[in-house]
Amino acid sequence: MGGHTSNYVPTSRWGKWLDERLPIARLMQSSFVDYPTPRNLNYLWTFGGILTVCLLAQIVTGVVLAMHYQPSDAGAFNSIEHIRRDVNYGWMLRNLHSVGASMFFLAVYIHIFRGFYYGSYKAPREVLWILGVIIMLLMMATAFMGYTLPWGQMSFWGVTVITNLFSALDTIYAGLGTAIVEWLWGGYAVSGVTLNRFFALHYLLPFVLTGVVGLHIWALHVVGQNNPTGLDIKQPSDTVPMHPYATAKDSVGLFAFLILFAWFAFFVPDYLGHADNYIEANPLVTPPHIVPEWYFLPFYAILRAFTSSFLGIPLGQYAKLCGVVAMFSAVILIAFAPWLDTSRVRSTKYRPIFKWFFWFFLFTCVALGYLGSRPAEGVYVVASQIFTVCYFLFFLAVMPIVGLIETPRRLPRSITDAVLSKSGAGLPTGATAAPESR
Amino acid sequence: MKKHLSLALLSMIAATVAVGSLSAEEAGHQEIERQKWSFSGFTGQFDKAQLQRGFQVYKEVCSACHGLKRVAFRNLVQPGGPEFPEDAVKQLAASWPNQITDGPNDEGKMFERPPLLSDPIRGPYHNDNEARASQNGALPPDLSLIARARDSHREASWYIHPFLMLGDILNAYQEGGANYIYALLTEYSDAPADYKLTDGKYYNKAFPGHQIAMPPPLSDGVVAYQDGTPSTVDHYAHDVVAFLSWAADPSLDQRKRIGWQVILYLIVTTGLLYLGKKRIWKNIKH
C-alpha cells in the first residue's frame, strides 16, 4: 500500500510461485512488517491496534453468543439468562461482549481525541478522518441495536425513546416522521418484530464496520501516520520499521488496556450497565429514568438540551426537531474538522492558544456526559444548553478563528531533530531545537 | 475571551453545586447503607453456610409468595452455591409445595407432578394474574434476578462523583442491589404522622415512595436455624440477601477466581512485553 515498496523476498519456491500470482505475503510485509512508522510515536498511537483487537473480540464473542440467543419477544430475555447460567462459560462470553462494547468506545474516544490533539485530521488525512467518523457512526448504530437485544426494561425503553426521535420530522412534513418510525418498528409499537430486525442488523453491521476499517487502514498507509510533532516524514531517519518497533510498543499498550478490560469484565461487569436491564421488557411499565449507555451520554445531553426554549430562545413545537438535528450534527460536524481548522500546524503542542481550547473541549464533552446522566430538570438543563453551545463553538468558532489569530511556536525542522533535542543526545542544528522560542 | 469563559464556567459550577445539593434533599432520597458481604469486592466469595441459611429463609418465608423460576433445584447442588447434598435436594424437590405442570400425557391431558432436580423452583402462582388476584392487586416479583435488578445510588455533587465512581470501580463494588434489598427487609417502621398511607400498605423507608404492599416478612425467631446462628431479623436479612445474590449471579465465585488468573497473566505479560519493548528500542532515540 502507499508509496512504500516492499523489500519482500520469497524464500521458498512455493512462496515465489504464490507471489507471482497473488502477492498477499508481499502486501502483508509492506503493510505490517517493514512499513515505515515515525520513530516518535507515543502510547496514544497504540489505540489503533487496540481498536482492531476490540472489533475482533466483539465479533468472536458475538458470533458465539448468537448461537445461544433467541431474538424474539418471549425468548430474548430468557435466552440471555440461559447463556449466563447454563451455557459453558456463557457468563464470561456475555460479560466480555457487553463490557467489550464499553471498552471499544473508551478506546475509540481516546483515539479520536488523540486525533484532535495532534491534528491528525488535517491534509492529507481528510479521507482517513472521514472514514473514521463513518466507523464511529457504524459503531454507534451497532452498539445501540446490540443494547436492545437483552430485551430488558432499559433496552426496550431506550429503543422506544431513540426510534421515536424520527417522529420529530412530522413538524416538517405531517406524517413523514410517524411513517419512518413505524417502518423502523415494523408495527405501531416497539415489539419482537423490532427486536428481530435489530438482531439481524446487529449481526450485519460489524462486518460492514470491518470493511470500512480496512479502508481506514488503507488510507492510513497511503498518507502515513501522523506523529506527536505533526511534521511530515522527511527523511529515512524519521522512521523505524513497523516491526519490531511499533509492534513491540503496540503489544505493551494492548496488554495494558486488556488489564482494564479484564477488570471490568471479571470484577465489575454490571458497573457500566443498568440494574433496570435485569427486569424483562414490559411495555406497560416505564422506568423512572431512561438513560442510555455511558458512551452516548454526551450526545443524549445535547438532544435533551433543546427544551421548549434554548437559553431564552423559544423553540415551541420545533424543540424536538432541533434536539435531533443538533445531536446528529454533533457527530457529523466532526467529519468537517479538516476544513474548519484553519491552522496549518498540526500538533497542538505548537499551538499555544488552541491548546487551552482543546482541553476545554475535552472538559465540555465530559461535562455533557455527566449532564446526560442527570434528570433533565432545573439547572441541569441550563448547564446542558451552555455546554451544547460550547461544543458547537469549538468546531464553528474556535477551529476557524484560532487558526487565523494564533502565532504557533517554532516547529522543529524534522522528527529526527525533535527527537534528538528532547533526549539531549547529539545537539541538533541551530535554533530549531528550542520549541519555546518565539 | 478566556476570562469570559472561566467566568461562565465558575458561575455554572456554583449553580450546579447549589441545585445539586437541593435536588438530592427535595427528592427525599434515602441513603442506602452499605453492608459487609462475604462476596463483596474483588476477592469476595459466597459463604456456603450462609447461602444454606439464606435458602432456608427463602423456603420458609419468601417462597410463600415469590418464585425463583430461573434457579433449578439442581443449581442448589452445584459448586459455588449452597452446595446441598444431592439426595437432600432430590427430597426437597419431591416435597416442594408448588408442582410442575407437565404433559400432555397419553390421554392428551396436562397434569401436575412434583418437581425433579432439573425443574425450576416455582412460586405458588401459575401466572401474574393469579398472583395479583390473591395479593390484593400487587405482584410479588420473581426473585431470581432481584439482587441485580435493583440498585442503590449514592447522591453526590458533580465534583465528588468521579471520585466515588473511581472508588467503586477499584473496590469492585457490585452490591448495590444486595444493600438495597437488605435495607428494604429491615427498614419497615410506623409511618410518620404527616404521611398518608394507603390501606393495606406498609411504610418502608428504603422503598421508593415509601409505601409497599409486602407486609414485613421477617421477625425475630420466625426461622429456626440449625447451626447456632442467632435467629434475628438482621441475620435473616443478611443470609437471604446473600442467597438471592447467588441466585442472581451463580457464577460469581468462578468469575472472580478466573478473573484473578486473567489479571495476573495480563500484568506479567505486560511487564515482559514492556521489558522487550525497552530492549528493542534501546538504541533508538524516540
Image: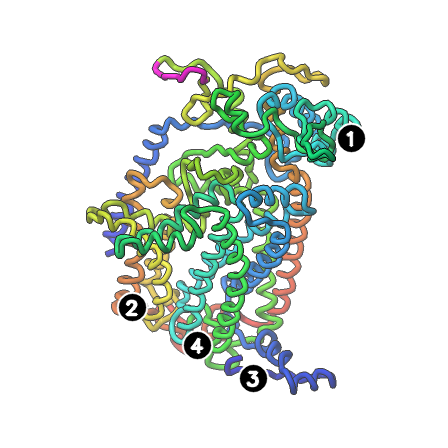
Q: Are marks 3 and 2 in contact (CB under 8 Å)?
A: no
Label 2 environment density (alpha carbons within 10 Å; few <14, some 14–19, many ≥20): some
Tag 2: amino acid: Gly
Disc ID at residue B181: none
Q: Tag 3, which chain?
A: A
Q: Which span is picked out in magenta?
A: B194-201
Label 1 environment density (alpha carbons within 10 Å; few <14, some 14–19, many ≥20): some
| Quarter of the view holding residue A172 | bottom left
Tag 1: amino acid: Glu
Give the quarter of the figure containing the C terminus of chain A: bottom left
Which of labels 4 and 1 is toward the front?
1
The residue under label 1 is: B86
Residues under labels 1 and 2: Cα distance? 75 Å
Which of labels 3 and 4 is toward the front?
3
Q: Are marks 1 and 2 in contact (CB under 8 Å)?
A: no
Give the camera-side residue of A431 and A244.
A244
Residues under labels 2 and 4: Cα distance? 19 Å
Residues under labels 4 and 1: Cα distance? 71 Å
Give the camera-side residue of A49 and B48.
B48
Give coordinates of residue B227: x percent, y percent: 72, 18
Label 1's element? helix
Q: Which residue is at 29% across, 38% downward? A: A378
| Dots 1 and 2 on the same chain | no
The residue under label 2 is: A403
Label 4's element? loop
Q: Tell me which numbered mark, 2 or 4, is placed earlier along the sequence.
A: 4
The residue under label 4 is: A232
Tag 4: amino acid: Asp
